[in-house]
Image (cartoon, grey):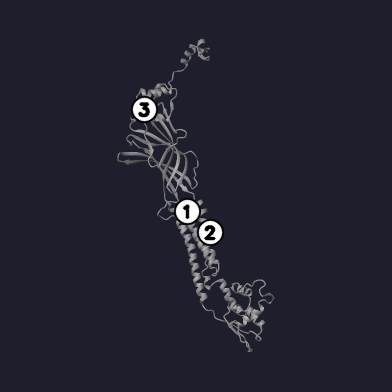
Amino acid sequence: MTLKNEIIYNWTPEDRGRHRHMTRQSDVYFRSLQQEPCVNDSYILNEILVGRKYNRHKIPGSPVHVTVEVWIQEITTISDITSDFQLDIYISETWQDPALTYAELMPCKYNLSLSSVLLEQLWTPNLCFINSKTADIHKSPFPNIFLMIYANGTVWTNYRLKLQGPCLMDLTRFPFDNVTCALTFESFNYNTDEVQMSWSPLGVSKMREKMELADYELTSIEQLRVTAPYPAGYWHELTMKFHFKRRAGWYILQAYLPTYLTICISWISFALGTQAIPARTMLGVNSLLAMTFQFGNIIRNLPRVSYVKAIDVWMLSCMTFVFCSLLELAWVGYLSREEESTPTPPVIVANEPPSPPNDPTTKASHFETSPLLRRQFFNHSKQTLLRVGVPPEETALVNLVRDNDYGYIPPGYGLNGTLKNPAVPVAESCPCVKSNNHRPSIPVSSSVPSQDTLRRKRRGPSFMKYLRPKPDLVGIGYGTHQALYEMHLSK
């Protein structure tokens, strides 16, 4: 017994000068007593496939129960244009094949991890995604297929797939809508009489706790098992549904707030006077063009559906506000033109002291105090100055004052007597100034507008007080109502 427990090493030389470790026969005998012999994986596979003449076309049982389990690795994209989504998953299938049992062969291990090439020699339930647009097995750096056979004949396969499946989109409440995407898994060849499918207790699971996309948030995953009728019988269908909620933050910042501010900018024209027609037109037209550009930028990333979306209602309402401000501008311009065409009753300028005849100083003073006389004077200045022989330089100065709408007199105008002497004959020849001709002066009757009339022109016509409502309250009320209504629909 001592010799059997004793281990004696021996080294024997080989042909190339190497030494090979040898043990005594007593040690081999001792090991045979301590443990039973086991067979390796190659012997088991050869015994199953060759020795037993395994038939891969024979269904292992009637029916075969297949258990399916899915792990969601990542959801990459959701496309609104094509109404689909892409994701990466691990899908596991397990079933039992009595022809693959090898427990009686005394294996060294009771689970065999094999290559995917061997899967082609075994019977499989031929499961597939029947509604997927594309389904590819990852092949980096080799096909990502896992195969394991247990000693009791249970087969476990696992695939790493990249899928593209359809999504059901109802854009009526866009961008406060929800999206549902579904994938259906079933056997392509065998009906329920041959293969019955079911979800595992774990079912569909996520490999990460929280899965979010740029525009969507995954709210829940639903798993269903349905028996669908076909002409060849009934098939079990395993469906997993992904429910997504659209994130509206981007649309609020890029669509709702800019359009609301554009409407407020278009309302600035209400505060301008009726004489500022070009400025009011520029505000209204630019606001309408900006609104149209924003609307086109949003809808070009959406499918061309024939029904009305929530964002369509908002954008069209905003464009209606801007368009109505342009209509108000046209109406104000039309009414102000009618009011200006109405003749103004003349104002009698009385109680003026009589002026001595042929007094240039008096005529010049009366010319400076009467805007009407000054305008009529400049209308006849050019011809008169040319007749009396005034140089062209002084004629240009007179025309500069005449063409100035604000009555601005340039610096140095009339200094050093340059225009004092020519102004006297001009004023004498102007029909707007009444010469006394050695007769007593009489009151001058003219249509000079009063200060109230000028102030009223600057403020605008009298009807403008009715055309200045509180548009801010209308827009704020509409925007608040629309936002609350869409939030209620999203719930």
Label 2: few (<14), some (14–19) or many (≥20) C-alpha neighbours in 10 Å: few
Residue 219 place in picture, x, y as percent: 47, 45
Label whose residue precedes the other's in the sequence (3 or 1): 3
Per the model, the C-alpha gap separating discs 2 and 3 is 73 Å
From the viewer's perspective, is the residue at label 2 or at label 3 nearer? Answer: 2
Image quadrant where residue 166 sits = top left
Whether residue 373 is visible? no
Label 2 is placed on what type of residue? Leu
Callout count: 3
Q: CA distance from mark 2 to mark 1?
A: 17 Å
Tell me which numbered mark, 2 or 3, is placed earlier along the sequence.
3
**Disc 1, SS:** helix
In this view, 157 is above or below 279: above
Q: Which residue is mark 1?
A: 298
Q: Amino acid at mark 1?
A: Ile
- The residue closer to the viewer here, 117 or 420, is 420
Q: Could you give the CA–CA distance between mark 3 and mark 1, rounded to whole angstroms?
A: 60 Å
Mark 2 highlights which residue?
261
Q: Which residue occupies the foreground of this view, 261 or 109?
A: 261
Report helix, strand or loop for mark 2.
helix
- Residue 453, image x, y percentages: 57, 76
Please identify, in this view, whether the residue under mark 3 or under mark 1 is nearer the observer: 1
Mark 3, other Cα within 10 Å: few <14 / some 14–19 / many ≥20: few
- The residue at which mark 3 appears reads as 98
The residue lying at 43 percent from left, 24 percent from top is 41
Q: Secondary structure at mark 3?
A: helix
Q: Can residue 195 be seen here? A: yes
Q: Which residue is the extreme one toward the left?
A: 231
**What amino acid type should be assigned to the residue bearing mark 3?**
Pro
Q: In the figure, 186 relative to 44: above or below?
A: below
Closer to us: 436 or 275: 436
Q: Position of residue 81 (x, y in %)?
A: 43, 49
